[in-house]
Image (cartoon, rainbow, N blue to C red):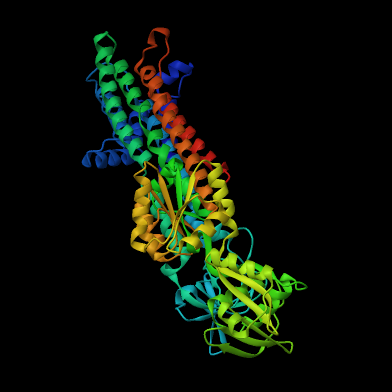
Amino acid sequence: MFRDRFWLSLALSIPVVFWSGHIQELLGYQAPEFPGTRWIPPVLGTVVFLYGGLVFLKGAWGELRDRLPGMMTLISLAILVAFLFSWVVELGLIQAEALWWELATLVTIMLLGHWIEMRSITQAQGALKELAKLLPDTATRITDGEEEEVSVEELRDGDLVLVRPGESFPADGTVSKGSGDVSEAMITGESRPVKKEEGDEVIAGTLNGENSLRMEVTGTGEDTKLSGIMRLVSEAQKSKSRAQHLADRAAQLLTGVAITAGAVTLVTWHLLGADIDFSIVRMVTVLVIACPHALGLAVPLVVAISTTLGAQGGLLVRDRRGLEEARNLDTVIFDKTGTLTLGEFRVVEMAVAEGVSEDEALTLAAGVESDSEHPIARGIVQTAKDRELSIPSAEDFEAITGKGIAASVDGTRYHMGGPALLEAEDADVSTPIREAAEAAADRGQAAIYLLRDGEAMAVFAVADAIREESREAVRALQEQGLEVAMLTGDAQAVADAVAKELGIDTVFAEVLPEDKASKVEELQGQGKRVAMVGDGVNDAPALATADIGIAIGAGTDVAVEAGHIVLVRSDPRDIVRILTLSRATYRKMLQNLWWAAGYNIVAIPLAAGVLAGWDILLTPAVGAILMSASTVIVALNAQLLRRVEL
């Protein structure tokens, strides 16, 4: 709309300027004359006022109706005064020079400035449109063994869908057949493809690799994670931070200052004996140049860009204040299970008998446990898979109540279990294996033995495995001077073992779910600015209590809804990226606010004519150019935020 009005107003303004007597005198040329040429400036100037200026008048009416005068009020006041004054002159009520060319160029330049502003904001919010493009229009649904192409809107939970190589997943779901790499970069910011096997989740909009996969639909339309991301980004871009409220108050204050300065300028020049047209031109120039246009753009554009950058990097900002306050953090509390750890059992340490390698022992153990559904058994098997070991098949599987299991691998009988199995089998245990088992018990970890012919071949310390990323995250936060604490409901020994491995000094263990929030309050009571990072239902109160709640994206919906910021990748290292984005965003906000407000300190006196004695005077059009230039500078400075490396 601003673009269309600008081009037409520009076309109409050119003859207004060309046939203006003041411009002809200034540039020393004579415009062609024919009947009616005298009325070209007033008629076309009026059309520009009514067509191009109407949008500003409507905006001013809305501001005044809401009792929040701002930039639209100032612009409208300037063009309305110029319009009425010019017609008073045309009707011969006073002897002065009309301001038609100033009015037409002022409206045109203001339209250009608003067009630039809207275009910048639209580009900054373009990530939402790009996210929407990730979803395909159609999907291949399989019904009774037959393939049919249907629109994505027709998919329902439980449908079976074929996703061919290079296609995007049309909905959220789980892999029901096949395996292959999937690129989730567009959702999580993670560039490396993710291996997907049967039972693994896939996200709508992500890109299938080189293998065909069949998936069972679990979420469509508004229920997909992609839709949730779009919703969060949109809400965050609309929300106002404290800096935005400060900018709004400054803009309102500047409006009052501009109106007062305009009135004082008019009265002062009139009392000094200046012509009425000169006095009015000075007043109009003050009103134009003091317009808080750049001030109104300073923060919203930074907000839009930073929120988009975060979303592209897997950082979803639900509440702008959370991102804004992140720069002030001095303490980060991590929930243990599912945040610092995987929330799944893995073999974290092992000891083997003489003559047995770790890979050999783990391969045999995974084969024996492969038919067991026990969480510890699945952890041993998964550890072998993580090491890319070839797991042998087992035969004659037997569950031994209260003691463990037994199975045959390549014709040899093996037993696996805890201390009760050792006693039942009267097994021989070497000193290194016994010491490793005792150390695991001291750390609160399960010690699982592998026995062959009544002799312990190995012992596996099985526990909730620490994420590899957690070590880097804790170290990076500590290097930036932040205190890192851990909060868990687990036993003290388990918590201390994890904290020791990660280098965390402050540990809250054996904390009941309802008491987690009180631990956050305890640190806040010491004057600390606290961020809470968690993923479970029992973390939600603590997330809401903390100065900043950071929810792990793989966690429950309750935890995600309670957080100010959501980590899509469930990677604790992203906390450091939040701090980087927060600090960069705040710097840009301050730079823009200082420029937008500071330039008025020089511009308003100049517009009022304090240098008139040296023949330095600004016309309303030049004032509009300077005001628009400040808006462009603010917009360009905000765009530089895109260069920040997260």
Q: Position of residue 640 (x, y in %)?
A: 54, 39
Relative to 228, is 78 on the left or the right?
left
Task: Tell me the quarter of the picture where residue 244 sits.
Answer: top left
Q: Which residue is depicted at the point 43% across and 24% down? A: 622
Q: Position of residue 347 (x, y in %)?
A: 61, 69
Q: Which residue is depicted at the point 48% across and 18% down? A: 29
* Vertical order, 586 against 607 (above or below): below
Q: Nearer the viewer, residue 39 or 152?
A: 152
Q: Which residue is depicted at the point 43% across and 59% down? A: 509
* Vertical order, 295 against 385 (above or below): above
Q: Is residue 47 visible?
A: no
Relative to 307, is 179 on the left or the right?
right
Q: Which residue is depicted at the point 33% across and 29% down? A: 42
Q: Nearer the viewer, residue 418 or 132?
A: 418
Task: Tell me the quarter of the picture where residue 156 sits.
Answer: bottom left
* Vertical order, 424 against 117 (above or below): below
Q: Nearer the viewer, residue 105 or 512?
A: 512
Q: Position of residue 180 (x, y in %)?
A: 65, 72
